Amino acid sequence: MIALQHAAPAPDPLSVPANAPEHCPGTESELAGKADACAGCANQEICASGQTRGPDPALPLVRERMSTVKRKILVLSGKGGVGKSTFTAQLGWAFAADGQLQTGIMDVDICGPSIPTILGIASEQVHSSSSGWSPVYVQDNLGVMSVGFMLPSSKDAIMWRGPKKNGLISQFLKDVDWGDLDYLVIDTPPGTSDEHLSIVQYLKESGIDGAVVITTPQEVALQDVRREIDFCRKVGIRVLGLVENMSGFVCPNCQTESQIFKPSTGGGRRLAQDMNVEFLGSVPLDPRIGKSADYGVSFLDEYPDSPASVAYLDIIDRIKDILGDS
């Protein structure tokens, strides 16, 4: 008789440590610390003891702090340089344009924190009080938290492994005094790695309302964005929709739009159809977007007549519709 060997179930990606071996069964698995892949792993002893199958002690603190946040939105992309941080800033400014809404932006791009520069608050520092760390405020109803506020110099490189990144994200969620927020927009680095897994794990109980995925038209970006959407599905994040950035070039003089990045495989619209997610819209290139980011001012306020501003606002209105907040 031939014995049939059943394949072990795939580990939950949220339960695999950053320094785990290739075939780690996951810290919550019954095989944790006991599988062949665990031999030589630095975590083997603690995994085998069963301690890792208990709840993270930070989770109740995160849940309590996040209980006053109505909406939590991730801005994601598998590809770098597609405009996630710029879109995050415009989304935050658009929400905060309603004086009745309280908005927060959390920058978890640990190694490349550009949000402080884009929002014009790069020289600010984080202050602490009895209720926790205080966000840096762009205006009365728009608060921001980023590792960029904690660096001695903007030139300092951040060379952290997964556990240290994980610890800082935990602090951003449980130790920052966000107060009552209508929206918390979370800017992420490219990829599907440490920062993404950490934010999903810590907000597992509090709930994430959804993710906006950013791409550019060319296939070299789309192939990574497909993986990002697959990541969302594997960890249970609702994809609110896909935004195609840099979809054309708007001449500041004549307002004519020209195509710069050729959508050789159909661009973001085709990708959205193939992946069965909503296509939220296209944002054309406008050189004044980069200028606004460098000077830390709102592009939407400075250039309201730009086709890019119109596109941003249409997309943001659609996000509100999907969330039921219009």
Image (cartoon, rainbow, N blue to C red):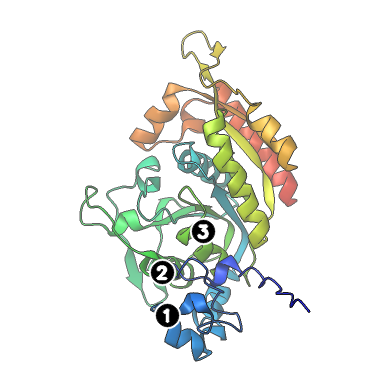
Residue 89 visible from this viewpoint:
yes
Q: Amino acid at mark 3?
A: His
Residue beneath disc 2: 19
Residue 78 screen position, x and y as percent: 53, 45
56 shown above or below 202: below
Rounded to the nearest whole Å, what is the CA distance between mark 1 and mark 3?
A: 21 Å
Residue beneath disc 1: 43
Q: Which element carries disc 3, helix, strand or loop? A: helix
9 shown above or below 31: above
Which one is closest to the eye, mark 1 or mark 3? Answer: 1
- C-beta proximity under 8 Å, tags 2 and 1: yes
Q: Quadrant of the N terminus?
A: bottom right
Rounded to the nearest whole Å, what is the CA distance between mark 2 and mark 1?
A: 8 Å
Q: Residue furthest right?
A: 1
Mark 2 Cα within 10 Å, few/some/many (few <14, many 20+)?
A: few
Q: Amino acid at mark 1?
A: Asn
Residue beneath disc 3: 196
Q: Amino acid at mark 2?
A: Asn
Q: Which element carries disc 2, helix, strand or loop? A: loop
Residue 158 screen position, x and y as percent: 28, 56
Between discs 3 and 2, the one toward the N terminus: 2
Q: What residue sits 54% from the left and 45% below the top?
A: 77
Which one is closest to the eye, mark 3 or mark 2? Answer: 2
Residue 278 visible from this viewpoint:
no
Would residue 194 appear left or right of 74 to someone viewing this image?
left
Would residue 261 appear left or right of 274 to someone viewing this image?
left
Mark 1 Cα within 10 Å, few/some/many (few <14, many 20+)?
A: some
